[in-house]
């Protein structure tokens, strides 16, 4: 009898061990199917490289690119869309491959969460080639360690996923794996970067005193209405010839705090007011920048907020400090900060603690519930409070909360994140 019970017990254990992996696999597969789809344009092992590449992606695509650590690959994934619609993610990845410089765009289906077990499919996820819809066993990434081998990240010739060791270190880490677009301008093409083209020097100066201004110039192929690349101001760069017969291109400089300046130039015979050639043979194109004036409205494109929060991401510091410098430069400035959200739904609002000075971190925060209008107001207020903490008179600043009443894009579209913004209106100058 004892022998019978022994073999019966062995049989039960064998059945459990046989079916348990199958059951677990089914559970994990179900979790994976419920996970979001990320449209990924690059992967990096170095935090600061992911930070800078994200900034360039934002400037190039005009979307709120973000990056998070993929614990399975141990890489920072830079993505431009997160959606539950798998087919939409595939279509968007294919579009970016065809219409942008990000020709290696792929889809990551899974979660970035670290809370799942190492065996969990939902923790690892899968990388998908949108062209074949097959799983990718390897993910290309580049974090060059030799400055001699590195090309600038904003060069139109740099493939998706590559980065530059010449990038300066980030001024502050978010402290989490979830970090978004950075504000400092991406590095531009250097004259010896191997690009075939003409040497240009875009001279960016402040109109009132001719002081140099840090910023970039976008070159636009006029005939094809397509951006050729972004180039850093005040250093020699090589610009490739536009792919058109006329050679016409538009040079656009838009630096926060200044009015946009645009020049039409023929690449083959660059002529115009102030255009000259320096001793090194570079074509010098001047951009005399004028500060914003009464009635002007500027969007703070490089100020981003944590999800459901009236707390700025660390990368926002650069542009907020640009606003601070503008106000300090002209004590007569009075501004109104306009807060906007994507849609009008109420929900959770994360805000700074009562005595907190952490404007760029989720450390010491509190949670509440509020309307979209209240969230937009709180986001405008945190910028005002940052300016106040740096000595700006409160009488010089006003706030207007719009919630989701003035969207720039479809609130359900792929560019919906552009609706989340703060605008600066000049009331007096």
Image (cartoon, grey):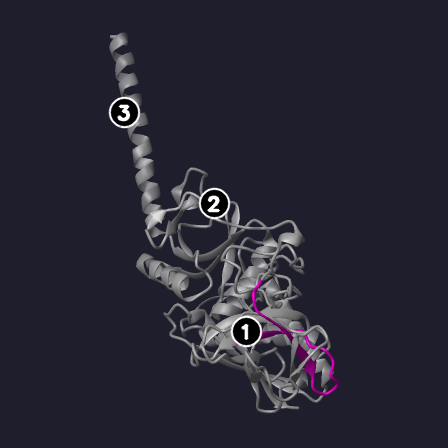
Res 181 visible: no
Q: Which mark is residue 75?
A: none
Q: Which residues are magenta?
A: 195-219
**Upstream in the sequence, badge 1 or badge 3?**
3
Which residue in the structure is indicated by mark 1? 301
**The image quarter in which residue 151 lies:** bottom right
Figure quadrant of the C terminus: bottom right
Q: Is residue 202 magenta?
A: yes
Q: Which mark is residue 15?
A: 3
Vertical placement of residue 71 versus 331, above or below: above
Judging from the image, what secondary structure is the residue with disc 2 in? loop
Q: Is residue 363 magenta?
A: no
**Upstream in the sequence, badge 3 or badge 2?**
3
Judging from the image, what secondary structure is the residue with disc 3 in? helix
Specify whether 6 is left or right of 232.
left
Q: Judge by depth and name the residue closer to the eye, 310 or 406.
A: 406
Dot 1 surroundings within 10 Å: few (below 14), some, or many (20 or more)? many
**Upstream in the sequence, badge 2 or badge 1?**
2
The residue drawn where x is 55% and y is 65% is 56
Judging from the image, what secondary structure is the residue with disc 1 in? loop
Q: Which mark is residue 115?
A: 2
Figure quadrant of the N terminus: top left
Vertical placement of residue 389 versus 84, above or below: below
Report how far apart the C-alphas of labels 3 and 2 lie in the structure: 30 Å
Vertical placement of residue 121 versus 5, above or below: below
Q: Mark 2 and mark 3 in contact (Cβ < 8 Å)?
A: no
Vertical placement of residue 363 versus 336, above or below: above
Report how far apart the C-alphas of labels 1 and 3 lie in the structure: 59 Å
- Residue 271: where, in percent of width, then height? 60, 85
């Amino acid at each position: 009898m004892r022998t019978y019970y022994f073999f019966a017990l062995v049989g039960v254990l064998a059945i459990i061990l046989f079916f348990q992996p199958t059951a677990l696999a089914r559970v994990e597969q179900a979790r994976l199917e419920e996970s979001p789809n990320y449209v990924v344009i690059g992967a990096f092992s170095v935090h600061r490289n992911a930070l800078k590449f994200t900034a360039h992606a934002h400037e190039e695509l005009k979307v709120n690119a973000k990056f998070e650590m993929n614990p399975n690959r141990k890489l920072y994934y830079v993505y431009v869309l997160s959606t539950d619609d798998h087919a939409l993610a595939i279509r968007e990845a294919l579009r970016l491959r065809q219409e942008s410089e990000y020709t290696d765009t792929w889809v990551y289906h899974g979660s970035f969460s670290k809370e799942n077990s190492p065996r969990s499919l939902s923790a690892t996820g899968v990388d998908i080639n949108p062209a074949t819809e097959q799983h990718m066993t390897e993910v290309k990434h580049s974090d060059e360690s030799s400055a001699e081998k590195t090309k600038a990240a904003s060069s139109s010739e740099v493939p998706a996923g590559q980065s530059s060791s010449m990038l300066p270190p980030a001024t502050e880490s978010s402290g989490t794996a979830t970090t978004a677009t950075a504000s400092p301008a991406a590095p531009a093409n250097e004259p010896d970067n191997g690009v075939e083209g003409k040497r240009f020097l875009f001279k960016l100066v402040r109109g009132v005193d001719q002081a140099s201004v840090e910023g970039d110039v976008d070159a636009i192929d006029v005939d094809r209405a397509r951006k050729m690349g972004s180039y850093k101001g005040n250093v020699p760069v090589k610009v490739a010839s536009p792919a058109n017969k006329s050679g016409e291109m538009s040079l656009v400089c838009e630096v926060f705090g200044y009015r946009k300046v645009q020049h039409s130039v023929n690449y083959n015979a660059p002529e115009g007011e102030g255009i000259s050639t320096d001793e090194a043979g570079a074509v010098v194109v001047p951009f005399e920048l004028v500060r914003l004036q009464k009635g002007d409205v500027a969007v703070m494109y490089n100020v981003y907020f944590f999800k459901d929060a009236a707390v700025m991401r660390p990368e926002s510091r650069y542009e907020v400090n640009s606003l601070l410098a503008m106000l300090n430069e002209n004590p007569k400035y009075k501004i109104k900060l306009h807060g906007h959200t994507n849609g009008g739904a109420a929900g959770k609002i994360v805000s700074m603690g009562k005595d907190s000075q952490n404007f760029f971190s989720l450390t010491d925060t509190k949670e509440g519930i509020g309307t979209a209008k209240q969230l937009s107001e709180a986001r405008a207020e945190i910028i005002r409070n940052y300016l106040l903490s740096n000595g700006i008179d409160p009488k010089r600043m006003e706030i207007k909360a719009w919630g989701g009443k003035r969207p720039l894009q479809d609130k359900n579209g792929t560019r919906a994140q552009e609706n989340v913004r703060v605008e600066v209106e000049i009331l007096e100058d």
